Image (cartoon, rainbow, N blue to C red):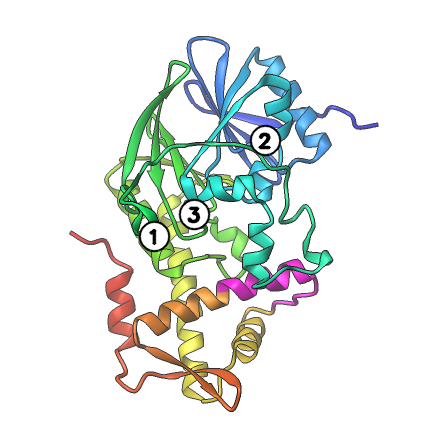
Amino acid sequence: MVHEVLPDITEIAQRIYVVRGRTCVGILSGPSEDCILVDAGPGEDAWNLGLDALLASQALLPRLIINTHTHADHCGSNSYFIRKYRARVACTPLEALRAKQPIVEPMMIFGAVPPENLMTKFFLFEPFEAITLFKLSGTGSKAVYTVEPGGFSEHRFHGIDVQVVSLPGHTPGHIGVGKDGVLFVGDALIPQAALVTNPIPIYWDASTAIKTLVVLKDFVNKRTYETLICAHGGKLVDPLNDLETVLKRVRDVLQTLVERADEGDMTLDSAMEVLARRWRMNLVAPTEYFLVRSAVLSYLAYLTDLKILRMVVNKSRLQWLPSTKRNSFEEIISQEMVAKG
């Protein structure tokens, strides 16, 4: 039997709450009993019942779930609230595609049809339909987002005004959800404390992830959003410090890869090994290994596109070497990690 355990809830601002758990969930309430969930949680029975009981204790009805992105630990609980309350779900178009076909995630991570030990709740969740918050412009293969990193659109759902902010990088269609100076950033930013157990920030696209971190710094500096809520860590006490620390870690990861490539014969395996040694990682589970592997490939792709490294196939081995037209790592990365304009 699963017992209902009330999760920990904190009021961040008027009618804005964060529920702490393995994945933090936001609650935005309005003048009525209707509320919006920012993410829903990992889909575990105890969590579903506990969050449901907490909402009932506050006389709140979840009418809409806005997913920052469609990883299982953020949207695994969607189906529970869809079935019980007929809640709708909103996310960006790219995330909505994965919502319909969750197998896309382990396929992307593995690079082919994945083996059974990757077909777990760590990656998979019950499929659901989602409305999309950003429209596409263009047609066919040329369709692109109308909103760039840091751009936002305003919406009103059930009498509750929210801003939806584009924060891609961790996933292609990742968003933040803002209201009254509070921004729920999902996994676009991890707190510096999380770097102890997860020393390599996980990005699908390192280039846009860096732009997103710079945008978040700009938001905080300009007080567009004074409070940032991370999905894995909750409210940040000193968000600028966390942002600077994560940007420095990204820079250190990139520099470690460049230095290893300068030694010659850097394969993906040797890139993984040098990073694991530097930050004392011990990857034992296949899910953990392939998640970090995908992030390392993202960093390598970024360095390749910047023409700091080049990718070659030599005697059937894929290698990364210093670029023949070597661009300055320090100069380029320094420029990439500062606000534009």
Kindly report the distance in space between the C-alpha atoms of the residues bearing marks 1 and 3. 26 Å
Question: What x and y, as percent, mark residue 229?
Answer: 45, 37
Give the main secondary structure of the magenta stretch. helix
Q: Residues within 10 Å of mark 3 (few under 14, many from 20)?
A: many
Q: Report the residue marked by disc 3.
A: 188
Query: Depth check: 175 or 338 in front?
Result: 175
In the image, what residue type sits under mark 2? Asn
Q: Residues within 10 Å of mark 1 (few under 14, many from 20)?
A: few
Query: Depth check: 8 or 215 in front?
Result: 215
In the image, what residue type sits under mark 1? Ser
Query: Depth check: 165 or 127 in front?
Result: 127
Q: Report the residue marked by disc 1.
A: 141
Q: What residue range appears in magenta?
A: 281-295
Question: What x and y, as percent, mark residue 276?
Answer: 58, 71
Which residue reaches farthest left?
341
Disc 3 is placed on an element classified as loop
Question: What x and y, as percent, mark residue 185?
Answer: 42, 40
Kindly report the distance in space between the C-alpha atoms of the residues bearing marks 2 and 1. 30 Å
Disc 1 is placed on an element classified as helix
Q: Report the residue marked by disc 2.
A: 78
Split into 4 quadrants, where in the image is the N terminus? Answer: top right
Question: What x and y, as percent, mark residue 180?
Answer: 33, 25
The answer to whether one can see residue 169 in this image is: yes
